Image (spheres, helix red, strand yellow):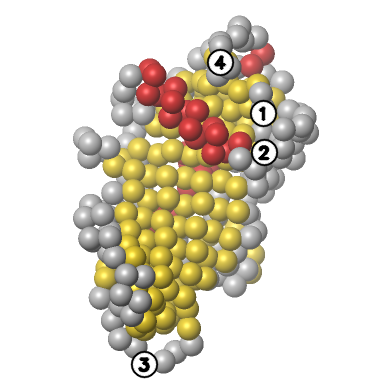
Amino acid sequence: MPMLHQHSALLTFLSIALVSTSCHASSTDVEPAGTAVRSVPGGTSTATGTDLWAPFLAVAAGNYVAQCESMSIPPEPVAKENGPLLIAADGSLRAGDITGNIRPANVVSVRRSREMSGVHRMSLSVSSDTVSLGMVEQEDGTKQAAFGTRPNSFECRLAEKVPPSTRTIYSQLAGYFDAAGKLTCRHTRTRKVTKADYQMDNGLFTIGTTRFDLSTLKSETLIMWPGKRFVYMGQSDDASSFHLDLDAHGKTKALEMRKMGGNLIKCTPLPSSPDTPA
């Protein structure tokens, strides 16, 4: 991938991460690393439950030992204390005098997408009140990170190449989003309203007669507002897609589904009742 493309991608992901970031936060005013938060549907904490941070931390961790470079435009000299960037598996971050942990984030997102070669690569964005982080895995196997606080942002390259991602985001959630119920759905083009069963279980997401195999998605994205809500999105090879809104406990709040051909369907959960396919 050309360097210009790589730099543009990093800028994009860091910009996403910076959306909710305070412009006046101190780079050292960060919560310390903590114990992994583990939850199960219903909000009950358990030591053997699902670690909702696992997909994000797996992408972020790394030792970015190469000299970090300023992302300022025009470029400015970068002091040595701005690198290397070290991100531990628990989410703790250190880059010179910038220290912190990505867990206290306001919003964090991870995306898994398939390259033209068929290989899956991951990208990540994190926004907190003190530090923001963007991460992109490149087609050549290298991984780059952009981090910092406005207007001081830097980019670094991972010392070693990363293997292709073989685990889906869904599989790392160990069934946290698995659910079954009934929806009332409105077809935005025809304005027809129908009812449908829906189920997410064992890697399959079924809405009426439509089925998504979560293991073969062309792209898969999870966005988390810690303790508040989630968005889980996926797109298949035939351009069908879904956008699932969930509460803090993984319970479905709303669903948008676009079938092949562009027909958009909007659904909301309802109590059990006779159903017809969406």
**Dot 4 amino acid type:** Ile
**Dot 1 amino acid type:** Thr
Q: Nearer the N terminus, badge 1 or badge 3?
A: 1
* CB-based contact (under 8 Å), mark 1 and mark 2: yes
Residue found farthest to the top: 77
Q: Residue at x 37, y 24 (%)?
A: 5
Q: Nearer the N terminus, badge 4 or badge 3?
A: 4
The residue to which callout 3 is attached is 274
- Rendered-image quadrant of the C terminus: bottom left
Q: Is residue 116 visible?
A: yes
The residue to which callout 2 is attached is 21
The residue to which callout 4 is attached is 73
x then y, percent, for residue 274: 36, 92
x then y, percent, for residue 211: 27, 68
**Dot 3 amino acid type:** Pro
* CB-based contact (under 8 Å), mark 4 and mark 3: no
Marks 2 and 3, how far apart in space? 46 Å
Q: Residues within 10 Å of mark 2 (few under 14, many from 20)?
A: many
Q: Nearer the N terminus, badge 1 or badge 2?
A: 2
**Dot 2 amino acid type:** Thr
Marks 1 and 3, how far apart in space? 53 Å
The residue to which callout 1 is attached is 149
What kind of element bears circle 3? loop
Q: Residues within 10 Å of mark 3 (few under 14, many from 20)?
A: few
Is residue 45 found left or right of 117 in the rendered image? right
